[in-house]
Amino acid sequence: MTMAYQPMTLADLAGQLAPRHDEKIRWKLVWEFFEEYRWAAERQQPGLFLDEPPLIGNEQWDVLLAAIAEHLAAQLDLAPPEWSRARVLGTPWFPSSLRSKRMEALVSAPAAFRKHGVYLSARDLEAA
């Protein structure tokens, strides 16, 4: 018996991020989530981010998941998931250490990411 392919959910992503400490691998997993999301049927997409992912124990990454959920909800003209509202950083997080990337993120981070205190450039999300 074969099982149908199921794209990664944010909860699945959280489960993969939790045990990993290598930032490069974490980012590759985030980009993989975005790729699977893009290929999912439109009717399937909300189900990939509406359920609250478990906390992974790193506030920045936990908030990143909330920002992703709110960003994707906005693209589908949906309200942000209720669980995402409480996940906000007190101090802004710029994942890139490159000054030029930080400046670009400051100017072009999507609204959902800025609201949560995560500064990724819109181009970084498109490249994902």
Image (cartoon, helix red, strand yellow):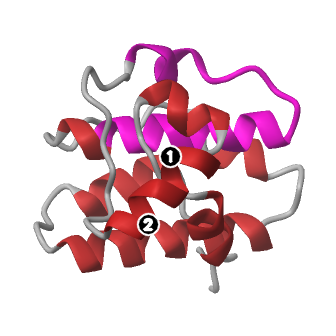
Q: Answer yes or no: is residue 26 visible.
A: yes
Quadrant assignment for the N terminus: bottom right
Give the side of residue 16 with respect to residue 107, left or right: left
Q: Residues within 10 Å of mark 2 (few under 14, many from 20)?
A: some
The kind of residue on which mark 1 rests is: Leu
Q: Residue 65 location, x and y as percent?
A: 43, 43
What residue is at 45 percent from the left and 28 percent from the top? 116
Q: Residue furthest bottom?
A: 2
Disc 2 from disc 1: Cα separation: 9 Å
Does residue 63 belong to the magenta stretch?
A: yes
What residue is at 10 percent from the left and 67 percent from the top? 21
The answer to whether residue 42 is above or below residue 97 is above
Q: Quadrant of residue 81?
A: top right
Does residue 81 belong to the magenta stretch?
A: yes
Quadrant assignment for the C terminus: bottom right
> Foreground residue, 8 or 122?
122
Identify the mark at residue 48; answer none if there is no mark.
none
Task: Read off the magenta span.
Answer: 62-86
Q: Residue 7 location, x and y as percent?
A: 62, 67
Q: Residues within 10 Å of mark 1 (few under 14, many from 20)?
A: some
What residue is at 26 percent from the left and 60 percent from the top? 17
* Residue tagged 1: 106
The answer to whether residue 14 is above or below residue 79 is below
* Residue tagged 2: 101
> Foreground residue, 117 or 73?
117
Secondary structure of residue under mark 2:
helix
